[in-house]
Amino acid sequence: MDIETFLDLIPQSQSDQLLTTWGFDLVREYFDVAQQLPPTNSPVIELATGTGRMCAILSCMFPSTISGDISLADLPRTLQRVPKQFLSNIQFLQLNMENLPFCSDSIISLVCMNTMHEVEHPQKCLQEMIRVMSPDGTLVVGDFNRAGFNAMQKIHEIVYHNDHHKGFISNNEIKKILVSSFHSVRSITTPLNITYFSSLKK
C-alpha cells in the first residue's frame, strides 16, 4: 500500500486541516517516521495516544500496535481516525509514562512523538522508555522544532484560545540523554519535527 492510500484512509483532525492550509502535513511526517521503523511481528508500542494520529498510521503498517496514554478520554475521537479494517491491529492501554507496565529490556519498537513537551517530568519518562527497550530494539522519540512549536501556538490561539505548552525539555537535552544510553542515535528533520532513532542500547 503506498503512502497516498494510507493518507486517504486517515481522516484529518481540525489541527491537521489548519496545518494543511499553512503548507504542512503532520500525518505525512508521522508516516515518514513510521516507515523507517524496522519490520517486526512484535507489538509496536506508542506513547502517547492523544487524538490518534500516530496510532492510526501504525495500525495500517504493523500487525500489532499497543498505544498507551495517561487517560483514555480521547479514545472515541481516536477510534474515528483508525481505519476500521485495521482496528483489530491495535490495543489501547491506560498507563503512566513515569512507570511503564513493561519489563526491562523487553520492547523491540517504541514510538513517542510530540509528547515530551507535554509531560511534567520528561527526563523520568525518557529514562522509563530507555529502561524497557531491548538491546536489539529501536526507540523513536520526536518533538516539535521551532516551526512546529510556532504552528502549534497558532493552532492553540485559533482553536483553544490559549497558549501552547512548550514543556520542560529541549530537543538537544533529549538527544544528550539518548546518546548517553545508546550506541547509535540518528536524527531526521521534517518540516515540523526533529526525530531521533536510537538503537543498540548500552
Image (cartoon, rainbow, N blue to C red):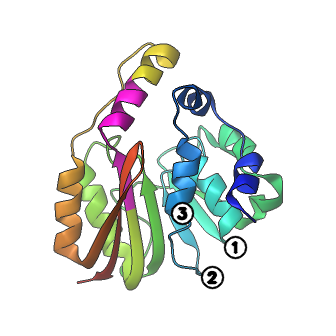
Look at the numbered disc 2 and give the secondary structure of its residue.
loop
Q: Splitting the image into 4 quarters, where does residue 149 fall?
A: top left
Residue lying at 36% horizontally and 26% vertically, measured from the top left: 164
Q: What's the magenta bit mostly, secondary-structure-wise?
A: helix
Residue 136's x, y, as percent?
40, 87
Q: Nearer the viewer, mark 3 or mark 1?
A: 3
How far apart, in angstroms, are the residues tagged by discs 3 and 2? 15 Å
Q: Is residue 182 magenta?
A: no
Residue lying at 21% horizontally and 46% vertically, measured from the top left: 170
Residue lying at 35% horizontally and 35% vertically, measured from the top left: 147
Residue 160's x, y, as percent?
48, 17
| Residue 33 visible at all | yes
Residue under pointer 3: 34
Residue under pointer 2: 41
Q: Is residue 147 magenta?
A: yes
How far apart, in angstroms, are the residues tagged by discs 1 and 2? 7 Å
Q: Nearer the viewer, mark 3 or mark 2?
A: 3
Q: Are marks 3 and 1 in contact (CB under 8 Å)?
A: no
Kindly identify the amino acid type of the residue bearing the numbered disc 3. Answer: Ala
Residue 187's x, y, as percent?
32, 63
Q: Are marks 1 and 2 in contact (CB under 8 Å)?
A: yes
Viewer-side residue, 12 vs 201: 12
Look at the numbered disc 3 and give the secondary structure of its residue.
helix
Sequence-first disc among 3 and 2: 3
| Rendered position, 45 above or below 137 | above
Report the quarter where the N terminus lies: bottom right
Viewer-side residue, 27 vs 159: 27
Residue lying at 53% horizontally and 53% vertically, measured from the top left: 30
Residue lying at the far front in this picture: please name it. Answer: 23
Viewer-side residue, 51 vs 14: 14
Residue lying at the far right in this picture: please name it. Answer: 85
Decide if residue 4 is on the left or right side of residue 118.
right
